[in-house]
Amino acid sequence: MKNKGIKILGAAAVAASVFMASGWSFFKMTVRCKKQKKLLKKKWFQLSHTKINHPRHKFEKEYEDGKMWCMRQNMQDCYIKSSDGLILHAYYLPARNAERFVLLIHGYKGSGFGDFAYTSRFLHENHCHLLFIDQRCCGMSQGKYITFGAMEQYDVQKWAYYIARRNKSRLPIYLYGESMGAAAALMASGRKLPKEVKGLIADCGFRSMKQQIKDMAANWFHLHWIGLLLLRLDLFCAISAGFRMKEADTTNAMKKNKRPVLFFHGEEDTYVNPKNSTYNYSVCQASKELVLIPGARHLCSAYVEPELYREKILCFFAKYD
């Protein structure tokens, strides 16, 4: 009996180890960021969704031209310290006869020069000082973990105050986020921000970390029941990265936010389902507009309908400057 009990305990220990190890692997893939080492992409993760939802898929020339324009500009390096002690970096590009500041907040494992490749030149030529934020773990910013907005919202808040302190002319400030950057901006809107922040632009933002992972599991891998995986992921987020998944959620912020929001989303987006922006729009209590672009995938609305996209942004500025 004693040996049988030991075997049962041993089998249970092995099962528990395998159970937790699989959760740890998923945590490392989604949350932990090893930006100092080039990650080897696993073949099973090289899905068509990641390719067809990138602007390069159909708009490579426009995308690369935009990145090159960004790289040719003479930008200033800016730094702040996050609430948890990380040194965060951004590039600042002043504009002549500026009428406003726009904080550009890129998405998951992205970059300002990439996510805003197609719109940054347009904004700059329309009298916008630009701040290209390197999210924690990305670019020249420190960090080990991507928190899907849980901590990034505080970083956005700090950058807003950084600009406000240097905004001697009291120009309007706008938060403009794409994908996870949009979610972080929406979350930040529920917190105290400088009075100069006049509005937000959210392109393809998700509603929460939990819902985004559930959507990807269902749409990409046809997994509709991942409660145990989410439980393990949340556990590792709490133990290793210092946040809980429930903290990466736009709902409470959208109910509290009083600043106008301009939402964009491509109707063919299979990376962040358009229902996320529809939800954020429905919950938002401030002045709002939702622009859904037929035929556009993730972050491709500006490429598919450039005139409409730019007109909406300029009208938004004109209304709230």
Image (cartoon, rainbow, N blue to C red):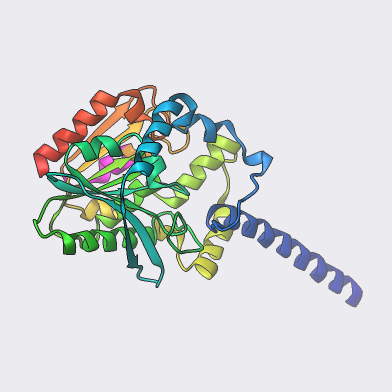
Residue 18 position, x and y percent, is: 73, 60
Is the residue 159 above or below the residue 199 in the image? Answer: below
Q: Which residue is painted at 37% across and 58% down in the image? A: 152
The N terminus appears in which quarter of the rendering?
bottom right
Q: Nearer the viewer, residue 57 or 297?
A: 57
Judge left or right: residue 199 versus residue 7. left
Is the residue 239 above or below the residue 262 in the image? Answer: below
Q: Is residue 155 visible?
A: yes
Judge left or right: residue 61 versus residue 100. right
Residue 195 position, x and y percent, is: 13, 58
Prevailing SS of the magenta stretch = helix
Residue 4 position, x and y percent, is: 89, 71
Judge left or right: residue 200 versus residue 32. left
Q: Nearer the viewer, residue 110 or 185?
A: 110
Q: Which residue is painted at 56% across and 58% down in the image? A: 36
Residue 39 position, x and y percent, is: 62, 50
Residue 166, quarter of the rendered image: bottom left
Is the residue 318 above or below the residue 229 in the image? Answer: above
Is residue 283 on the magenta stretch?
yes
Is residue 163 on the magenta stretch?
no
Q: How many marks?
A: 0
The magenta span reads 278-286
